[in-house]
Image: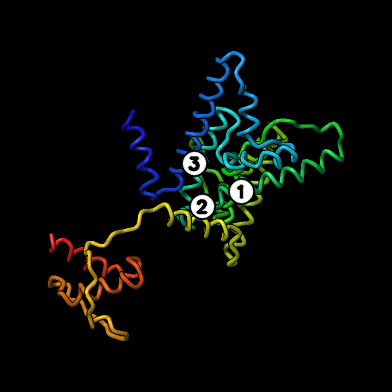
Amino acid sequence: MGKVFTDIAEVFKRNSNQATQLIMINLIVFFGFTLIRFTLSLIPESVVSPLSFDQNTLTSSNIIQVVTHPWTLLFHPFTQRGLFSMIFDVMMIYWFGNMLADFIGGRKMLMTYLAGSYFAVAFYLIVWSVFSLLNKELTYSGFLYGASPGGFALMYAYVALNPESEMLFFGIRIKTRLLVLAFLVLSIFRNPPLGILDLGGAVFGYVQMKLLRTGINLTYGMEKVSIWITEVLQPRKRSIFQKYPPNKSSERGKVIQFNRELPPTEEEIDYLLDKINKGGYSSLSNEEKNRLHKASQSAD
């Protein structure tokens, strides 16, 4: 069991595949919530009932409940309606999340998923309210699940970037845009309220990619916050040297020439250490990082 938790932790430490991280979070939330509900159902006269747990972890379709229970939005992008819905969402994240990340990068893919999930809530509250005013018989008092609209945001973002792409579906080659359109229509007919939610995610993903190609990034603010959080959570890199001796090799305008065939000289090391002291490790070029790494191996 310890090995399982270690492997899961490594997925997030490496920070190399955001699609895999999204899948892991969705699985943890789904099975974790399921286990908690099952445990609560076994406890007679429990202070916290399964329904009470859902009301405090799932986003309500009632705007008043959303306003009075804002913490439910923290879990919203990773909640699913059931087992089959979870399997579908995970598959969509795996396929379209990885393909989209190849074009726009993992961070933008992740932000598209999260923003699409949240935008879908606002989209649903507006659209369903209008429908309810036009038809008083339309009522829905259930919960809103965010993993599915997040997945639709990824699907339609990919289609916006590659409208002529094709996929193999049960051995049949089909246009990707027709496949995701069929998924969306099926979702709307199967459950109109949640279908409207998925439509909101699809609209955001499509518009986000179209605007991104013109230089407008709707998730720019979220990306800056995620970068800041990553920098705060990541441990600071320690230099392999403890002291930064004063030197004249890093004077303004002075350029140090590296000879790749020879070990780093003391002048080179002083220059690199002084540059780190002023601008941090990230200020080094790839060649300079390699020279510093080579110096550390020589020191050992």
Q: Residue at x 32, y 31 (%)?
A: 2
Quadrant of residue 288 in the image?
A: bottom left
Q: Which residue is mark 1?
A: 116
Label 1: element kind: helix
**Which label was assigned to residue 196?**
none
Q: Residue at x 21, y 64 (%)?
A: 241
**Which label was assigned to residue 168?**
3
Cβ atoms at labels 2 and 3 below 8 Å apart: no
Which of pointers 2 and 3 lies earlier in the amino acid sequence? 2
In the rendered image, residue 282, in percent from the top left (x then y), is placed at 35, 66
Disc 2 residue type (three-letter): Met
| 221 is higher (above) or lower (below) than 50 | below
Q: Residues within 10 Å of mark 2 (few under 14, many from 20)?
A: many
Cβ atoms at labels 1 and 2 below 8 Å apart: no
Along the line of sight, which residue is nearer the eye, 232 or 15?
232
Tell me if residue 205 can be seen: yes
Q: Which residue is mark 2?
A: 109
Which image quarter holds the N terminus? top left
* Colour scheme of the picture: rainbow
Q: Residue at x 65, y 40 (%)?
A: 184
Quadrant of residue 124 in the image?
A: top right
Marks 3 and 1 sit apart, C-alpha to C-alpha, by 26 Å
In the rendered image, residue 72, in percent from the top left (x then y), is placed at 62, 38
Disc 1 residue type (three-letter): Gly
Disc 3 residue type (three-letter): Leu
Marks 2 and 3 sit apart, C-alpha to C-alpha, by 22 Å
| 103 is higher (above) or lower (below) than 1 | below
* Count of numbered circles in the view: 3
